[in-house]
Image (cartoon, rainbow, N blue to C red):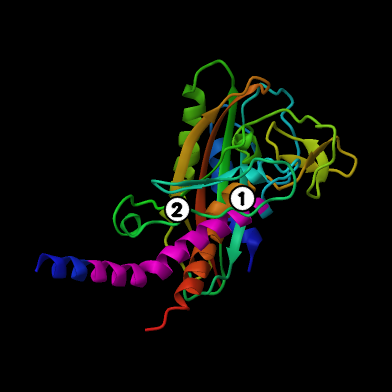
Amino acid sequence: MARRRNDFMRLAKNIEAGFLAPFIIGVARSAENIVLQLQEQGPAWSGQFSNSWEIATSSKVSTGTGASGEAQRLKAPILTVDEFKFKPEIKYYIANKAPHADVALDLVESNYRYPGYEPIKKAERGQRVSGLRGDLAVNPTGPNRRTAPLDWYTTYLRGGAIDKTISLYMDQSLRNVKL
Amino acid sequence: MNYQSIRATVENPLLTAFGALVPAVPVYFDNITAVPPNTTTEYIRVNVTFGITNEPTLTSSVDNARGAIIIRIFTEKGRGPARNQTLLTTAVNALETLNNTAKTNSGVFFRVGEINGPTFSATEDAPHFVGRIDTSFVATVLS
């Protein structure tokens, strides 16, 4: 009797996992594509910042290599059924672990220093107005450069692009569901 | 879409609020390159950025835009956060008035979202103590 009950519970769990799989995959793809867009829209001089994004769940973490060069795609850890259903309310944390991340995100001021090599991303020339990385009075002969506009990160978070990415990849994942 | 009227809806109340202070505090908006003559002088930096325009699911109107408002308050370093917080309060109050404006038949209907911050920073190299807030906005141009 107990064995039959266990089999039934296992079957119920499998059905539940199958039902939730498109949602779980959808949020994972959304997180991956958010990072991809942050890599595309953010600054990139050596590429270390672009490769220092991290996607974390409450139990697992995927971390970028932090290496120089072109941005590498980051895979999101897959949520377990229980993580998706219950705790915590926030499913994924996305953060950048580069030592100079706050400067790249235009959160704190810094001094412009030419690192001795050219950026991997197209740069705009000008003169820094305040100490913020992207705060540049554009001028083709200016001494300073930026590879992403001022407040690119806040604009991405607050301007609706992140919501659009999530709905796009959730839709894409759920479109494959056959009922 | 009239981006200029949306920008004016944000910028005017902030300019008025900081202009009414004694002494008035200068406000620098996007693409205004004037640097304060004395770098220890306090000033305000306001950036209005646009994200998605005419997202069909947002409202029934198609003449709408989403974006972000980032306000940075630069005050003298080494003097505590009080002055910076006073100026931040002025900025937050000005943003809150935007949410109290009734919807009319013309002009711009403007709503800001939750305000993130303030966060403070003071780096070794820079002469200022910087307070920062940001918020999202949704604006509908009513014709």
**Is-magenta flag for residue A37?**
yes
Q: Secondary structure at mark 2?
A: strand
Identify residue for label 2. B113
Residue B39 place in picture, x, y as percent: 70, 23
> Which chain is home to disc 2?
B
Q: B62 and B12: which one is in front?
A: B62
Q: Position of residue B137 (x, y in %)?
A: 51, 56
Q: Are marks 1 and 2 in contact (CB under 8 Å)?
A: no
Instruction: Quadrant for the C terminus of chain A, please.
Output: bottom left
Query: Which residue is label 1 attached to?
Result: B48
Give the chain letter at badge 1: B
Judging depth in this view, the residue of B42 and B52 nearest the camera is: B52
Residue A165, quarter of the rendered image = bottom right
The structure residue drawn at horizontal position 24% and vertical position 67%, both measured from the top left corner, is: A10
Q: Is residue B35 above or below residue B71?
A: above
Residue B137 relative to residue A119: left or right: left
Q: Secondary structure at mark 1?
A: strand
Range of residues picked out in magenta: A10-39
Name the main secondary structure of what is drawn in magenta: helix
Determine the image quadrant of residue A112: top right
